[in-house]
Image: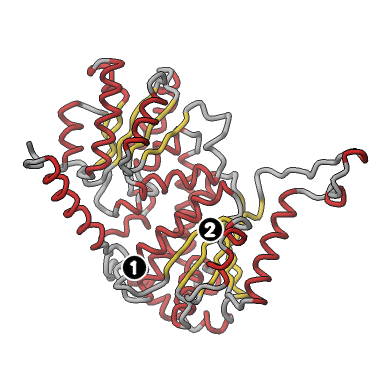
Amino acid sequence: MASSKINIDFSFAIKEESLNNYHDQIEELKAKIATNNIIGYQFLGCFNIFKNIQKNDYIDIKKIPQWLINEHIEYLVVIAPQHVCLQAEALIKFAGRDSSSDSKIKVIFVNECISARDIAKLTSFLSDKHFAINIISQKGETLETLLIFRELKAMLYKILGSVNAKKYIFATTNNNYGKLFKETKVNEYRHFVLLDNTTEKFLGYSAAIMLPLACVGVNLDKYLNGANAANEYFSKMPLKKNPAYQYAVIRRILLKNNYNFENINAYSNSDLDLARLFKMYLSETGLKNKNGIYVNSSLQGCDNNTFSENHTSSPFNPFDTSLVVENQQYDYEVSILSEHDNDNLNYLSKLTYNSIGKTITKSMRENHVIIYKIPHILIKISDNFNDDTLGWIMAFIHRASIMFAYLRELNPFQNSGLDSYNINLIKNITELSGGSKND
């Protein structure tokens, strides 16, 4: 079995013997997960990597980027709820594919934020561009997403005519219900199926995430094989050698000791969305019934300067989790200036920015641990340039967040707040329109 591409250092958070006390409980929960004898088991499809996408969809998606290039398409506009966009966007930015000159197709993510200013800016930008649309909604009923799709679809229809425009619309939704499914069938959009074996926040191996990743050049086979290797590793390894479940247990121990505020720290702008992805999964699975760990994401060492009191003087009991990349794709040497241009920083000229960045990480950790007694967890990711590493990351955070919920006897997939919001939104929008929502 391959060694883990993600490791964890908890020496500044808890004692190892405290971790080992959870060995039997973790083994019991692993057995329940393996036999589907646990709450929410019907949505654990994210643990079965190759059962999240239909085979014919997978084959088609791998062909689409070249087809778009041949059609002279410059942009793929992905319209989806933010929690779907984030699953793809975090990986794309982490791997540096958002600004890569190698990618001939640029992906624009459009979340469900309804703002006339934002829509006007987007439509203005796209007015002279060649673009295709990928709308994503598992249930096909997300009002905000459908509204934004309506506007961009109207643009394509106006530019290309309805018949030609339909060739450049990809709908990713379920296979039998909802407004989007019905519209897709009537208009014969290209349809990618979202299965019912997981929820919309766990679509990491589905068509929803595969198409954007493919368009920026991620090797989908390597990504899925990495995730599969990671899931096999995390499902079988005992707690002592299992970083995903170690992270879950460490968070459980800290919560029991009244540490209820977690800062997920990124150390590069490219990694900030990955910290937000961690925040989403950890919050959505483990924060229930006004109890649990409140999760924040931050960019260091910027936010520790900008919001220093939030980190060190908060009324909560905080702990830090830092996401660090051990082998960076790029490094940059500090410039050497001539003597007459000397800015008194030449003593740093033998260093690289990665080495300085590591020192910043170390300094922040020492300051928080030693001075402010803030526990610190270090999650070490092997690299940011191999596509299989992206699969390991997704598998790690799925496993860790879900296991934390199970350690607290919670259903990680329960989300009543979102359901009540959607019901209220439809009611208010119907009143605003002055009639039935079906008018």
Mark 1 lies on residue: 33
Q: Position of residue 22 (x, y in %)?
A: 46, 80
Q: Position of residue 91 (x, y in %)?
A: 49, 46
Mark 2 lies on residue: 298
Q: Amino acid at mark 2?
A: Ser
**Quarter in which the N terminus is drawn:** bottom right
Q: Quadrant of residue 53?
A: top left
The colouring scheme, among rainbow, by chain, secondary structure or one colour, is secondary structure
Q: Residues within 10 Å of mark 2 (few under 14, many from 20)?
A: many
Residue 266 located left or right of residue 127: right
Residue 58 located left or right of residue 308: left
Residue 236 located left or right of residue 114: right
In the image, what residue occupies the spot 33% across and 49% down?
Answer: 51
In the image, what residue occupies the spot 34% across and 68% down?
Answer: 33
Q: Name the front one of labels 2 and 1.
A: 2
Q: Is residue 377 above or below residue 388?
A: below
Depth order, front residue of 43/314? 314
Depth order, front residue of 299/210? 299
In the image, what residue occupies the spot 24% across and 28% down?
Answer: 189
Depth order, front residue of 382/308? 308
Depth order, front residue of 177/296? 296
Q: Is residue 399 above or below residue 190?
A: below
Label number found at residue 380: none
Q: Position of residue 161 (x, y in %)?
A: 25, 15
**Quarter in which the C terminus is drawn:** top left
Lower position in the chain sequence, tag 2 or tag 1:
1
